[in-house]
């Protein structure tokens, strides 16, 4: 474990140096020159941890998250921030949790042992929740940029935050979008009997019923169901105008495909688990027109300043949650600046009440639980094989995506 | 009525795939009394090989049907090779060993194959290429797609071909003779090892086709798909009477039907509000109009409940474990 982590750090460091060399040689080289003596002269190195899966099936997303945090740290170093009277040198310690809860707790402990001042991560809810207990014990603040499971901030940990929306905000958002935009009379709700699927389906049902829309008795599958025909055949007889499914793309794809094969013409809508381009591969032409939601905003809707900086630094566009991890790292740094200390005990209160912070994903402030106030939920529609954002729901209000983009561009 | 007819069509399609897989279990059991737990993984490998070949050929602009046929052909060839090697390397050395040894070996082979597939095809869910345009037809309000029709016809053809092979050809006669008594069959000049190898090859070839059909029907393939498919097909074989070829066919189709109808109607039957004397005492009935005990996610439970009931009443399976001409 030790070797792997050291390796990753080394590679990250080498990458950073190489990156500096390539892009703006004179300016960056000067920075590197300045930073090195600062680190050598005083104990003002401030370590910020990042944890996410950088190997395995979602390694690309983990790397994307890591890049977001890295960009924030690099920018902070260039800005020459002074903390406690000394020039601060921020170092990003990136570890690989392999999207595995067991590995996640091991690397969390590793970050604690490395005396990081704060942590950005993890990526998956299932990994973040057990890891958060370790950071809590050590009193280290952590901000996740992508863990959407409500449980994370329901544990009563004072040091746990997230800058992304919660799953239980997603259900009401997609349901209210359905109700106002598609005006269905009868809606069928299906879930995959997992805590995620059931949770989001319950929220959708609640919101639809509150809008006086008839909801059919809940149908269920499992997270391994590939044959939905029996359920769909039954539903077809009840003629719903819309179908909502709480589950992942692996089950949602076949559900959609089989629904269309059976001649169901209803609007299909899904939560973020099935809100991916993979739906086109799994459902083929049937995927066209599906509605789905994702907590947060699509990366291309992040501030232009961030997008340009990211492109310049990594020579690629952010994939998914990089704007959020960028904001998370910046919030840690901002709170340290406000408290004039990198001591977690001193800057944690500042982080909790941080106000007036505007990041790549818009203004951010935390509520009592550590959740983002008025988090955005984006509604997507499948068009020509790609999911395209169509609207943003924020604080119960629906804004068309084009208008939202304008507002983001305007604020910068 | 159209709902019922639709459930029957769905059940028949899934059931005929089960039936073809079940044949692989039953043939091997019939001839060497081994439950080849690795058979489900062979089905998975069939789907995976077809996935790779079809994806590789897709850009060359060949007719869609030809691509699918080549893909299926490769899948069948690879699976037959896997079937032969598995018999030769894992089961033949244990031919005289106590019953448990080959059984545990079969489980081991299954795990090895699964992880082998994991290494090659990753743990991700693979979207099975949908290159044949599927048309939907409506019969009395029930939808049936071209893929479903093709599956029903192919399965029927495979089952008839197998029946012809077992009951009308010299190889089939040799297989039935070996099933009855391997020693005597050997004395009569039958090369028992060759016949057993042939049984494995035919069974795994059928499994490969079933894998391709499954992948095309549901549009996905994953390295774990073999275990649940294998379990269901094995149950179907037991339902019909293991070792009995017509039994496996009947068992597969029945299991598919029971599953589809179960999933379609279990929610209605367990809706307590339908039963007047209960409805009055349940609060939810007045509020929501329904109080469902077991929803459609219990379809597997329902299917296996039926299986247990049949086995309690008829331990030898529906058509019985006919020793005489099991093969």
Image: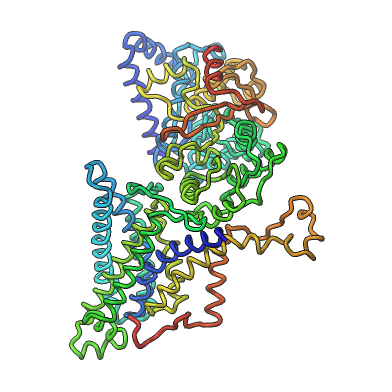
Which residue is pictured at 34% across the width and 61% down the height? B112
| Foreground of the two, A376 or A52 | A376
Which residue is pictured at 48% across the width and 60% down the height? B10
Quadrant in which the N terminus of chain B is drawn: bottom right
Task: Identify the coloring.
Answer: rainbow
Residue located farthest toward the left when viewing the structure as drawn: B189
Judge from the rendering whether residue A74 lies leftward or rightward of residue A230; answer left or right: left
Residue B281 coordinates in the image, percent (x, y): 81, 60
| Picture layout, residue B246 above or below residue A238 | below
Which residue is pictured at 25% across the width and 65% down the height? B80
The quarter of the displayed image where residue A150 is located: top right
Instruction: Report if residue A109 is visible in the image.
Output: no
Q: Please state the total of marks drawn on the protein image.
A: 0
Instruction: Report if residue A409 is visible in the image.
Output: yes
Quadrant in which the C terminus of chain B is drawn: bottom left
Judge from the rendering whether residue A295 lies leftward or rightward of residue A349; answer left or right: left
The quarter of the displayed image where residue A66 is located: top left
| Foreground of the two, A351 or B21 | B21
Which residue is pictured at 29% across the width and 84% down the height? B176
| Foreground of the two, A153 or B52 | B52
| Picture layout, residue A330 above or below residue B8 | above
| Foreground of the two, A28 or A151 | A151
Judge from the rendering whether residue A138 lies leftward or rightward of residue B219; answer left or right: right
Residue A254 coordinates in the image, percent (x, y): 46, 49
| Picture layout, residue B43 above or below residue B122 | below
Judge from the rendering whether residue B247 lies leftward or rightward of residue A185; answer left or right: left
Residue B167 coordinates in the image, percent (x, y): 28, 81
Residue A75 coordinates in the image, percent (x, y): 45, 16
Residue located farthest toward the front when viewing the structure as drawn: B140
């Amino acid at each position: 474990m030790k070797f792997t982590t050291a390796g990753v750090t080394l590679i990250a460091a080498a990458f950073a140096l190489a990156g500096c060399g390539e892009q703006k040689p004179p300016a960056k080289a000067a920075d590197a020159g300045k930073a090195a003596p600062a680190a050598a002269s005083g104990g003002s190195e401030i370590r910020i941890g990042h944890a996410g899966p950088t190997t395995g099936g979602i390694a690309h997303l983990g790397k994307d998250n890591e890049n977001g945090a890295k960009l924030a740290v690099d920018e902070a170093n260039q800005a020459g921030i002074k903390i406690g009277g000394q020039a601060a040198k921020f170092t990003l310690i990136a570890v690989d949790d392999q999207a595995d809860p067991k590995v996640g707790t091991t690397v969390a402990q590793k970050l604690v042992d490395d005396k990081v001042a704060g942590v950005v991560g993890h990526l998956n809810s299932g990994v973040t929740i057990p890891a958060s207990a370790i950071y809590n014990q050590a009193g280290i603040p952590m901000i996740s940029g992508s863990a959407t499971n409500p449980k994370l901030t329901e544990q009563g940990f004072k040091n746990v935050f997230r800058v992304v929306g919660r799953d239980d905000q997603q259900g009401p958002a997609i349901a209210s979008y359905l109700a106002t935009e598609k005006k269905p009379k009868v809606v069928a709700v299906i879930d995959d009997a997992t805590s995620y699927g059931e949770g989001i389906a319950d929220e959708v049902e609640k919101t639809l019923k509150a809008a006086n829309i008839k909801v059919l008795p809940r149908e269920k599958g499992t997270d391994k169901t590939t044959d939905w025909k029996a359920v769909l055949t039954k539903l077809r007889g009840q003629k719903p105008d819309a179908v909502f499914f709480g589950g992942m793309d692996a089950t949602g794809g076949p559900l959609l495909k089989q629904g269309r094969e059976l001649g169901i013409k209803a609007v299909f809508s899904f939560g973020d688990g099935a809100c991916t381009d993979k739906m086109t591969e799994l459902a083929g032409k049937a995927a066209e027109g599906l509605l789905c939601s994702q907590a947060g905003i699509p990366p291309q809707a992040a501030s232009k300043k961030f997008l340009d900086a990211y492109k310049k630094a990594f020579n690629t566009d952010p994939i998914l949650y990089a704007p959020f991890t960028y904001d998370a790292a910046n919030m840690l740094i901002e709170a340290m600046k406000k408290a004039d200390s990198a001591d977690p005990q001193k800057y944690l209160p500042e982080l909790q009440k941080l106000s007036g912070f505007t990041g790549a994903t818009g203004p951010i402030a935390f509520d009592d639980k550590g959740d983002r106030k008025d988090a955005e939920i984006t509604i997507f529609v499948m068009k020509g094989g790609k999911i395209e954002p169509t609207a943003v729901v924020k604080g119960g209000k629906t804004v068309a995506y084009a208008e939202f983009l304008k507002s983001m561009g305007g604020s910068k | 009525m159209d709902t019922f007819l639709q459930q029957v069509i769905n059940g028949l399609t899934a059931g005929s795939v089960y039936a073809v897989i079940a044949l692989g279990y039953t043939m091997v059991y019939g001839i060497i009394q081994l439950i080849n737990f690795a058979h489900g993984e062979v089905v998975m490998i069939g789907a995976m090989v077809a996935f790779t070949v079809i994806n590789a050929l897709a850009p060359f602009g060949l007719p869609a049907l030809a691509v699918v046929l080549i893909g299926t052909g490769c899948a069948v060839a690879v699976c037959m090779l896997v079937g032969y090697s598995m018999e030769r390397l894992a089961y033949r050395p244990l031919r005289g060993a106590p019953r448990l040894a080959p059984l545990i070996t079969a489980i081991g082979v299954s795990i090895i194959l699964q992880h082998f597939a994991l290494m090659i095809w990753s743990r991700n869910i693979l979207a099975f290429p949908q290159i044949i345009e599927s048309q939907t037809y409506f019969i009395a309000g029930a939808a049936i797609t071209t893929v479903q029709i093709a599956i029903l016809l192919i399965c029927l053809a495979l089952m008839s071909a197998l029946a012809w092979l077992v009951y009308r050809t010299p190889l089939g006669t040799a297989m039935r003779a070996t099933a009855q008594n391997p020693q005597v069959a050997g004395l009569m000049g039958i090369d028992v090892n060759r016949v057993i190898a042939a049984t494995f090859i035919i069974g795994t070839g059928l499994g490969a086709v079933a894998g391709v059909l499954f992948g095309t029907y549901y549009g996905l393939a994953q390295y774990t798909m073999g275990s649940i498919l294998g379990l269901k097909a094995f149950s179907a074989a037991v339902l019909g009477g293991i070792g009995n070829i017509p039994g496996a066919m009947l068992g597969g189709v029945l299991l598919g039907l029971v599953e589809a109808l179960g999933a379609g109607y279990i929610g209605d039957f367990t809706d307590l509000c339908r039963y007047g004397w209960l409805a009055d005492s349940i609060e939810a009935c007045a509020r929501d109009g329904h109080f469902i005990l077991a929803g459609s996610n219990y379809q597997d439970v329902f299917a296996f409940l039926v299986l247990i009931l049949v086995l309690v009443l008829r331990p030898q399976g529906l058509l019985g474990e006919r020793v005489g001409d099991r093969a």
